[in-house]
Image: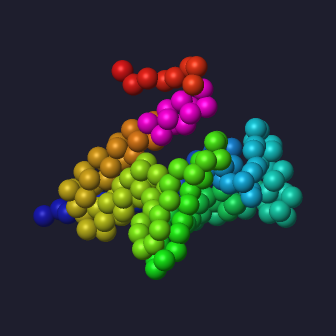
Amino acid sequence: MKTIKLQRKKMIARRAAHELILTMAKHGNHSLDIEYRISFVTDADVKRFFSAQDIDFQDVVQKCREFKKSVPFFENLVGSTWYVLGGAKVTRVDANTNKKDLEVKGPGTITMSIYWTQYEEAENALDQAIENSSFIKFHSALVLGIACIESYIRYRTQEWNKIHSNDLIQDS
């Protein structure tokens, strides 16, 4: 009897890695960080940034062809959920309004965004589906992935509405 095993490609295409790096640099959430506010408009801007760091852009592209390699400087590796221990206090400030929008006094849990958490859960479910050849986990990964996209659209709509009170986007 023939068995079917799920697996990922070892590497993505060079062009896909190239586009991934440029997209993360130009559109990633690193530009919201006050300490690290960088904004790139063109592909050349991104390449100049890497050159200024003495890093060959083509070397980064080659490295990022491997599925689990991160994009240096522009990929957030901290994760969406943080655990606050003891009596610590964590406050999140909205990057657009500079107002406090979330506070946790430990112990507790803080989730930076729903869409990000859903993405991480979808990725975990996909990893488990591949590892265990599980159709159910694969189905869960798809459902969570779609929920992530819907949550991201909702998040971007809310961000737009905060800044553009005279041109609100309404869900129909």
Identify which residue, 68 or 9, lies in the foreground: 68
Which residues are drawn in magenta? 154-164
The magenta stretch spans residue 160: yes
With 147 as the anchor, is 136 left or right in this view? left
Is 76 drawn above or below residue 18 in the view shown? below
Q: Determine which quarter of the picture holds residue 36.
A: bottom right
Q: Determine which quarter of the picture holds residue 57.
A: bottom right
With 163 as the anchor, is 126 left or right in this view? left
Identify the main secondary structure in magenta: helix
- Number of numbered labels in the structure image: 0
Is 50 drawn above or below residue 108 in the view shown? above
Across and down, in percent, residue 62 comes to 66, 60
The magenta stretch spans residue 54: no
The colour scheme used to paint the residues is rainbow
Q: Determine which quarter of the picture holds residue 33.
A: bottom right
Across and down, in percent, residue 150 comes to 39, 38
With 123 as the anchor, is 89 left or right in this view? right
Picture residue at 56% right of the left edge, 60% below the top: 91
Identify which residue, 79 or 135, lies in the foreground: 79
Farthest-out residue, left: 1
With 155 as the anchor, is 144 left or right in this view? left
Q: Quadrant of the C terminus?
A: top left
